[in-house]
Amino acid sequence: MATAVKNEIEQLDAVIVGAGAAGLYMLHRLRGLGLKTTVIEAGDGVGGTWYWNRYPGARCDVTSVEYSFSFDKQLEQEWNWSEMMAPQPEIERYMNHVADRFDLRRDIRFSTRVTAVNWDDRATAWTVATDRGDRIEARYCIMATGCLSSPLKPDIKGIDSFTGVSVQTSMWPREGIELEGKRVALIGTGSSGVQSTPEIAKVASHLTVFQRTPTYTWPSMNRPLTAEDIAKVKANYEKMRQTQRSSRVGIAGSFGGALLEPPTAKLLDLPEEERRQKLDEHGFAVTRMFADVATDMEANIVAREMYAEMVRRVVTDPATAAALTPSDYPIGCKRAVVDQDYFVTFNRPNVKLVDLRNEPFEEVTEKGIRTSTGEYEFDVIVYATGFDAMTGALLNMNIKGREGRPLAEKWAAGPRNYLGLMAEGFPNLFTITGPGSPSVLSNMLVSIEQHVDWITECLSYLGANGKDVIEPTLEAEDSWVEHVNTVADGTMYTAPSCNSWYLGANVPGKTRQFMPYVGGVGVYRQKCDEVVAKGYDGFVLDTAKEAVAV
């Protein structure tokens, strides 16, 4: 790693922000181009999401063998996953293995945060400043900051008055939190809340879950992988990767159960008797087996009734079952959550659900939490309060493009860019899995690799053609934003009753805009390839003295 000289500007070819999966692979590819590159990482280790999120029960919701890199055949063969859906410690070990195997650490600056990113037209470069006093000038700046990497600080009255232990799921300490025999409060029932509830309940003397909005969650069907499973996958990796890249969500369905393509059967075509039969056969999964559930509100309501019936079958207390069942927003509105024994956990005698819709939250106290009905005392409070998704990490870095225009100003009414990769007015700034790309609606490793490969080929093209700068046109940007919105219209993602982090609805004051691309991984890849085939259609390629629109 090059050592920065304080108060002097260090000259590099590229700066990558973030040492998760995207940052690691991007560094590997840029080394292959011979570019002098550094990675800036806030944590003291690699892994990104899988470094920070160490909460009990943290687990990938994509099959492990598919949530892995495909760029190196030997890497595929040498690594063995232990479960169908790997837990956080195993994925973190995998990321560390990748970093060590390709000797990536020497170009990573750990425990360092970016404080400012400024474009300099005269230098045709970005100047990146850090909290350690680094000042780096680089032609290219690549944001590998992740979609879920800016935790939302709980805005709760009295939060600092609690004298016990407080922790956020997304900032769980490496040394862990003592939960055994403790009275634990868990606030939030999104993905991390759903995953951690069963695990905390196993060790806590008592767990109280405070729920504002119930969540649609489906059993993960996770299991250990056998030697036969692993051998089968290793013999068919190439075919599996091809299927992933052309699929809708970047998943090939290695062990079955994945909806690779949208279903075609319609729930409303089935008579009541057949619906009941399907429910008995498939349980919770039946709600994801029909095409009209995603586009027809009447079908969605029927599916919601079937889902509610499954909750009632699992949760023994009728009032708790009713509270755990979503009723005011459609299936498909929010990111699908998968769980291990979530609903059955509420049958335990040491678990209580507090429905904040009927028992409003008032404040955190010295001893615990007060609601409208009284005070609960706790030893530990766990905040599973989510993220400022997709844009938060980028806007927190004080990025300024041409003429000093802040990215926060450009995105004040919602993120605008081209292909989810670049924004007009911010030349040579790339956003891996940025808003406007499939990202969080897909297997992230597949989408990350596609973006990293696209950026690498782009920089290679620039170098081979004597160009220094690439920037999208405003027209191309406007067209892409319109396309992203058009594809999302008519789906449950944008239903009037839907308030999800896809729309930024979980962040006070954030403009409501659907951010990911619904069109699918395969379709999106084709569109990106078409742009390249047409000589980077929609971009302007610059040299120091000329700009050539293509």
Image (cartoon, grey):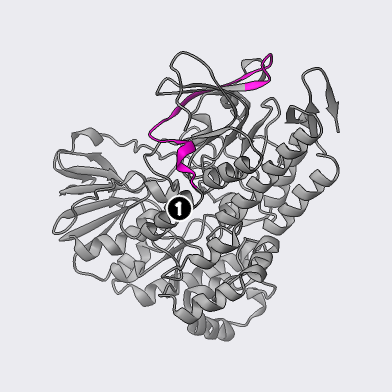
The tally of labels here is 1
Nearer the observer, 301 or 25? 25
Q: Which residue: 16% across, 58% down?
A: 180
Residue 288 placed where, x, y %?
Answer: 57, 70
Q: Along the horizontal axis of the image, is 546 left or right of 380?
A: right
Can residue 194 be seen from the camera position used here? no
User: In the picture provided, is 380 more to the left or to the right than 432?
Assistant: left
| Residue numbers of the magenta segment | 103-125
Name the residue nearer the viewer: 185 or 199: 199
State which quadrant residue 122 falls in.
top right
Q: Residue at x 53, y 67 (%)?
A: 77
Q: Is residue 499 visible?
A: yes
Across and down, in percent, residue 155 comes to 34, 35
User: Relative to residue 223, is residue 367 depicted above or below?
Assistant: above
Horizontal relation, residue 193 to residue 534: left or right: left
Residue 61 position (above or below residue 290): above
Which residue lies at the image location 68% right of the left edge and 20% below the top edge?
A: 124
Quadrant containing the C terminus in the rendered view: top right
The image position of residue 146, as x and y in percent, is: 51, 43
Label 1 packing within 10 angstroms: few (<14), some (14-19), many (20+): many
Residue at disc 1, secondary structure: helix
- Dot 1 amino acid type: Met
Q: Residue 46: image x %, image y %?
A: 43, 45
Q: Residue at x 59, y 55 (%)?
A: 441
163 within the magenta span? no
| Placement of 412 over or under 123, stated as above or below | below
Q: Residue tagged by mark 1?
A: 95
Using the rendered view, name the quadrant where residue 481 is placed. Answer: top right
